[in-house]
Amino acid sequence: MARRGAFSAPGAIILLTLLLLLAAMPTAAAALHPDVELLDADGNNVLDSGGPVSPMQTCNGCHDTDFIAAHSDHIQALDRPQHARLAPGQPSYAADPAGYVRWLKAYGTMHVGGGDAAKAGLDLDCFLCHTVRPDVEARNREITDGRFRWAATATLSGLGVVEKTGGSWQWKRASFNEDAALSADFLGIGAPTSTACGACHGTVDFSRAPLTSFPDPSNWNTYLRGEIYSPQRLADSGMNIQGKDHLGRPFDVHAERMVSCSNCHHAQNDPASFRSAQERRLGRLHTDVRRPSIGDFLETPDHRLARGWTSFGAADDPFAGSMRRCEDCHEVESSHTWLPYPKLHMAAMDCESCHIPRVTAPALQEADWTVLTPERQPRRVFRGVDGPADSPATLITPWRPLLLERFEGGRGERISPFSLVTSWRWVSGPKGEDVSQEELNQAWFEGDDYAPSIVAALDANQDHQLSPDELVLDTPTKVDVVRKRLEGLGLKDLRIVGEMEPYGLHHGVAPGSYAQSDCQACHGRGSQFRRATQVASVLPGGVEPALAAGSGSHMDGHFWKDQDGRYWYQGEIQQSSVYVLGASYDPIIDFLGKWLIVLTLLVVAFHALLRFLGARRNQREVQS
Amino acid sequence: MIRRIYLYSTYERVWHWSQALGILLLLLSGYELHRPDQLHIFGMQGAAWLHNLLGLLLIINAIFSLFYHVATGEIRQYLRQPDDVFTLAIQQARYYAYGIFRGDPHPFDRSPQRKLNPIQQATYVVILNVLLPLQVITGSMIWGAARYPDSVGRLWSLRLVSLIHTAGAWAFALFVIVHVYMTTTGHHPFSNIKAMITGYEEDERPEPTIQPQAPPEASQQEVR
C-alpha cells in the first residue's frame, strides 16, 4: 500500500495558496496602489523641478486632498481656538498672532501640516503617516529651522529617495523608476501603523530593544498621561521602574495582541470599520449596514478619525464616542464571572478604571508658566518620579490614576481614570488674555541671562544663579518683581491664573491578571475614590487652580494645602452621584447607629447590674 | 409545684431560630459590605452572595410564617389586644423600670393563648410589619438596581435606598441586643431561651397574678 503524504494534493494547493496570501498581506494595500509620481506645489515632477515635494499635489491625482484637508482632525485640531494653547498653561499662540511662525518652529513638529500651517508653508504631510520609514527627525529639523516647505521632502529621506547635501535637498534619480515615479511597494503605502501615530502622539515601541521613554512635550500622550503603547514587558524594558522584576505584564495588552491604533481610531467612512456615533445611531438598529463603497472611501477618506470622549471639546464634537469601545470587542460578563454585579460595574465605570491600575511612566503633574527656565520652558513637575524625569537613573514609582466622573454623552456619567495636570500662567487685561511667550522672555531675561532684579528676588542662596528649586514664585515679593517686569512691557492688570486639566487614560492597558481585582480598592473607607492626590508641589502666587472649563468631568472632593505648601485633592464619594458600596455612607446615620448601639449596651449593662444587686439584696432579706 | 406550659410549637421554634440565624448573618454580611475595611469574615464577594441568599431565604421564611400564623390563628397573638392594654403596658414598663430590681413578680404570665405581653406585641408588630418589610423592599431594590442598572436603577436613587437600608440595619441590630437581653428577664436568666428551644416554659411560682383569657380550645397546660 502506498504511503500517504502529510497533505493530499488539493490540501497542499490550498495550504500553498494560504501561505502566499499570508505573505502578500502586508503589502497588499501597497500592491493595489499605482506608482507614485512626486509632484511639487506647481504640479511638476520633483525630478524635473528639483523643488520640494507637495503631498497635496502628489496624492491629489487619486485622492481628493482638498476634501481630506477639510475633513482632518490632524489639520483642524490645532486651528481650533481650544487648541491654541498647545500644552497646559503654555501661552496661547492666539496671544501672539505675529509669532505664529515662531510658534510653528517650536511646536510644528506636532503638526501634520495643512490648514493655518500651510499658509506659513508647512504643507499637509501625507507621507508622515502613510509610508514606511518616514524620517520624522529629519522633518522635525526642517520645521525647527523654519524650512517648512522642505518638511515633507525630509520625511521621505528615510526611504533614501532624497538626501541633504551641502545644506540643500537633492532628489536621487536612481531611486525612481523609468517613469520618474516611485512604486507604491517601495513607499510602503498603506493605513497608518501604530508607530506612525506614535511619532507625534506618544511612545509607541514595537522593537526588541529595551524600551526607554522620557517626558517630551512632543510625545503628547506619554508626556501628559504617562501612556506607552508597546508589547514589551515592563520587566524587559530599560526603564527604572520600581519593582519591575515582578512586572511581567506588557506596557499595553492591546499592543501585545497586535491591535493597531487605526483598528479603533479608524476613518469615519472606512467601510470596513464604519459605525455611526451612538447619538446618531438609529434607535432600533444594532448596526447600520449602509456604508460608502471602497472607491468612494479611497477618493474621499474622512480623516476625522473615530475617537472616544476626549477630555476637552467633546461637548461640541459630533464624533465624540464614535470609536470602538472595549465592549465592542470584549464579552464582558462571561469574562468577569468573579465580579459581583458586572452590569452595574460596567454601567458605572469605564473598563480602564480597573485595567489601568497604575501608570508606569512619569507624567506631567504641573507646568508653571509664571516662571521660565534658562531654556525658556516652564517649571515642570512630574508625577511618578522624585528626581529629574529625563534621567534614566531616576526611579519611577508607578502611580495610581485619579478616578473621576466624566460625562460621556448617551453613556451618561461614568467613572474613568485620569492624569491630573495643573498649570499656571500670567494673564493681563480685563479679559484675561494670555501674556505671550515673547513677553515672558522679555520679562525674565536680558540677553541670555536672567534679569538682575529677578535673580536678586529669587536667589535664596545668594550664589547669583537660579537653581530649579529657586525658580518658583512662592512669595508675594517674588510675584511683584515679575509683575513689575511685565508691567514694564506695557501690560496691565496682570495676574496669575491656575487650571487643572484631567486627561483621560485609555492606553497602557493591563491584562486581566494585572487589573485591579481587589474589591476593597474601591469598596471601603480606603477607597480610591477617597484617596488623596497631589495636585501641586507649590501654589505659584498662592493661586489655587480651578478645574478647566469643558473638561466634562467634575471634582466633588475637597482641596487643602499641607504644611509643606503642597496642594492636595481628596475625593468625596458622598458628594458624587455614584453610590459605591463600602465607600459611600451617610456619616450621620452611621454615627447615630453606632452610638445608639453603645448607649443600648450601656443601658442593658446598667440594668443587668441593678438586677444583680437587687437579687443579692432580696436574697439577703429573705435569709434575714 | 412546677408548671410546665407548652408555649411554642415545633414550627414556631424552627421559624424563630432560623430567623435569628438569618438576621444575625445578614447583619454580619451587611456590615462587611458596609465597612469592608473593618470586618473580614466572608470577603466582599462572599458577603454579597451570602447577603442576597439570606435575604431570599428570609422572604421565603416570612411567607411560610405568614401562612402558618394565618392558618393556625396564631396571628391573633400579635393583633388581639386586651381592653386594658395600656394599663398592662404601663404595668409591664414599671416592672422593667424598677419592679424587677425589687424582686416583684412578673406582671404577665404567658400562656398558649397569650404568649406576648403588650410591649412585646407592639414591638413585634413594628418589627414584622414595618422594619422587616422595609429591609426586604429596600434590599430588593438594591439587588434589582445592581442587576438591571439601565432600567430598575433609574427608578430611584440607589443612594437614598441604601441609606434607608443601612438605617434599618442599625435598627435591627438594636432590636437584637434588646431582644437577647430581655430573654434573660424571665423567671430564670435562661428560662425564656430554654422555652424557645424545648417549646416548654417551666414556672415554679404560684398561680399567675394576671389570669389569661379563656382559651378558645382545649387547654394545653400540663400540671404535675
Image (tube, coloured by chain):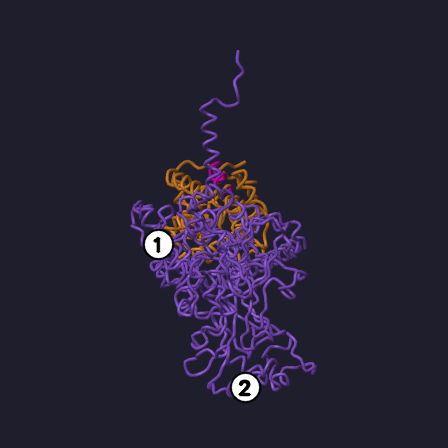
Chain colours: A purple, B orange
* Residue A469 left/right relative to A540: right
Q: Which residues are magenta?
A: B8-17
Q: Nearer the viewer, residue A540 or A221?
A: A221
Mark drawn on residue A470:
none
What type of secondary structure mainly makes up the magenta span? helix
Identify residue for label 2: A485
* Residue A444 left/right relative to A16: right
Chain hosting mark 2: A
1 and 2 marks on the same chain:
yes
Residue beneath the point at 37% across and 45% down:
A272
Q: Is residue A561 above or below residue B143?
A: below
Q: Position of residue A39 (x, y in %)?
A: 40, 58
Q: Is residue A513 above or below residue A397?
A: above
Mark 2 secondary-structure assignment: helix
Is B210 colored magenta in this rendering?
no
Residue B133 appears in the rendering: no
Q: Is residue B22 above or below residue A477?
A: above
Q: Which callout, 1 or 2, points at the residue further toward the start of the chain? A: 1
Q: Position of residue A99 (x, y in %)?
A: 46, 76
Identify residue for label 1: A61
- Amino acid type of the residue that numbered disc 2 sits on in the rendered structure: Arg
Q: Position of residue A452 (x, y in %)?
A: 62, 86
| Cα–Cα gap, marks 1 and 2 | 55 Å
- Amino acid type of the residue that numbered disc 1 sits on in the rendered structure: Gly
Residue B199 appears in the rendering: yes
